[in-house]
């Protein structure tokens, strides 16, 4: 199932307010691996679905040469999952200081950074579908992660390594 397109906005002026009648809105409460592949494909990103150790879907993708994952949580067999987490990492030989990741976490509204079990800086972007979200909201979350991940990688690649 592909994520449906949001209401067209080309004819609206910046001062207009979008109003979507609830009876016509598509509200997503759960998504599966195929839905996320469609979401990524809309952004020109190829991905693959594998299964994690718990039996839930896991999507692997690459954006601008950098690998990332989409993990699924609160899953019900054959019904999809009610939460996602985009997760990207930057493999570094010497890493960066925890003070830099702490500063990232304090100064950014979206995404959370930490060192993974191999010592690589990792960025996670959580998305909850509980209560329902629109396809447009999922697109904004995808784009928010991709933008933050690009900034995160850029910051790490220009920072001097220190732990």
Image (tube, helix red, strand yellow):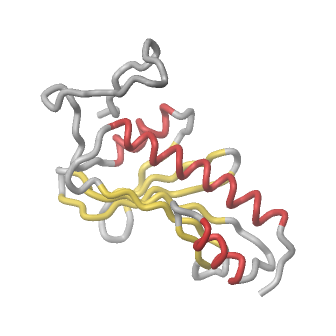
Residue 20 sits in quarter: top left
The residue positioned farthest toward the top in the image shown: 11
The residue positioned farthest toward the front in the image shown: 15
Front residue of 118 and 110: 110
Question: Residue at the spot x=25%, y=64% of the render?
Answer: 74
Front residue of 109 and 87: 109
Question: Residue at the spot x=61%, y=48% of the render?
Answer: 147
Residue 127 sits in quarter: bottom left
Q: Could you tell whether 137 is left or right of 31 in the image?
A: right
Instruction: Please state the total of marks drawn on the protein image.
Output: 0
Front residue of 19 and 112: 19
Residue 34 location (% of width, % of height): 35, 41
Q: Quadrant of the N terminus?
A: top left
Residue 68 location (% of width, % of height): 57, 56
Q: Is residue 65 above or below residue 119?
A: above
Residue 132 location (% of width, % of height): 22, 48
Question: Residue at the spot x=27%, y=27% of the render?
Answer: 19
The residue positioned farthest toward the bottom in the image shown: 163
Q: Could you tell whether 4 is left or right of 162 in the image?
A: left
Front residue of 49 and 144: 144
Q: Is residue 94 above or below residue 110?
A: below
Residue 156 location (% of width, % of height): 76, 66
Q: Quadrant of the C terminus?
A: bottom right
């Amino acid at each position: 199932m592909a994520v449906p397109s949001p209401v067209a906005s080309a004819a609206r002026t910046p001062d207009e307010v979008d109003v979507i009648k609830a009876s016509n809105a598509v509200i997503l409460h759960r998504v599966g691996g195929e839905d996320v592949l469609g979401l990524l494909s809309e952004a020109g990103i190829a991905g693959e679905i594998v299964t994690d150790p718990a039996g839930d879907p896991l999507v692997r993708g690459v954006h601008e040469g950098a690998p990332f994952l989409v993990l699924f949580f609160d899953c019900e067999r054959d019904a999809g999952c009610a939460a996602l987490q985009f997760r990207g990492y930057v493999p570094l030989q010497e890493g960066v200081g925890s003070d830099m990741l702490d500063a990232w976490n304090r100064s950014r509204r979206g995404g959370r950074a930490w060192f993974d079990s191999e010592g690589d800086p990792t960025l996670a972007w959580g998305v909850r579908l509980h209560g329902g979200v629109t396809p447009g909201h999922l697109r904004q979350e995808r784009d928010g992660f991709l933008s933050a991940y690009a900034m995160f990688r850029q910051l790490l690649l220009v920072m001097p390594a220190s732990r």
